[in-house]
Image: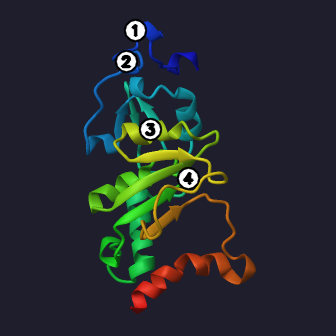
Amino acid sequence: MGELERHCPPLEKRLFCLAPPPKDYKIPIKWPLSRDYVWRSNVNHTYLAEVKGGQNWVHEKDQLWWFPGGGTHFKHGASEYIQRLGHMITNETGDLRSAGVVQVLDVGCGVASFSAYLLPLDIRTMSFAPKDGHENQIQFALERGIGAMIAAMGTKQLPYPSESFEMIHCSRCRIDFHENGNLLFLLMILPLILQMIQ
C-alpha cells in the first residue's frame, strides 16, 4: 500500500504543493474511449482486478484496464440491462430519458459501468460506494471520467437535497424491499407515482 501513498513534502517545501501523481502516471484517456479503457499505471489495483475479473467487471489488457460493460448483474452487458430497466418503467420505448430520468444515483456502483453506459444517453449520474473493502473501485470510476464518491451510509446523510435524482439504482443493496407489505418499495416509488398523477 505504501506505493499508493502520495503526500506533500515537508512544511518548508509545501508552499505550492500538489500531491504528486503515482509513478508512471499517464494523461488519462479521453471520453468516450475511457468508458472502456484506462491506463493500468494510473490505477494500480491488480488484486482488485483479479477479484473482479471473474465477475466480468474489469480485465487486464496489455498496459490497459478493460471494462467490458458486464458485471455481476449485467450478464448480457450494461446496455441491455439499461434497456430492460427502461422497458419496466415505460412499457414502450425502453428509453429512460423519455420516462423523465435525467439524474441517477448509483449506490454500490462497483467500477461504475452502469453510469458509464448512461452518459451517452444524456443521463447524468453520481456513482456512490460505501466505505468498505470495495472503496478502491471508485478510483476506476474517477479515472474513467465518471463522477463518484465514497461515504459511510450509516453515519452521514448524502449531500443532496430531496428530489435530486429521478432514479436510484442499487444492484446489491442487500435490502429486502418486500418486507412489511412492500413498505420500503412503496415509499421509494411514491414520489414517482405522485409526479405521474399531477
- For marks 3 and 1, the one nearer the N-term is 1
Which of 54/25 is in front? 25
Q: Which mark is residue 108?
A: 4
What residue does disc 2 label? 17
Name the amino acid, label 1: Lys
- For marks 1 and 4, the one nearer the N-term is 1
Q: Secondary structure at mark 4?
A: loop
Residue in view at x 49 percent, y 55 percent: 159
Q: Which mark is residue 140?
A: 3
> Which quarter shows the C terminus?
bottom left
Quarter location, residue 104? bottom left
Q: Secondary structure at mark 2?
A: loop
Mark 4 and mark 2: Cα distance apart in space: 33 Å
Q: Is residue 120 left or right of residue 114?
A: left
- Tag 2 and tag 3, C-beta contact below 8 Å: no
Residue 156's place in the image compared with 40, above or below, is below
Q: Which label lies toward us, 2 or 3?
A: 2
Q: In this view, which residue lies farthest toward the bottom?
A: 197
- Does the image show residue 81? yes
What residue does disc 1 label? 13
- For marks 4 and 3, the one nearer the N-term is 4
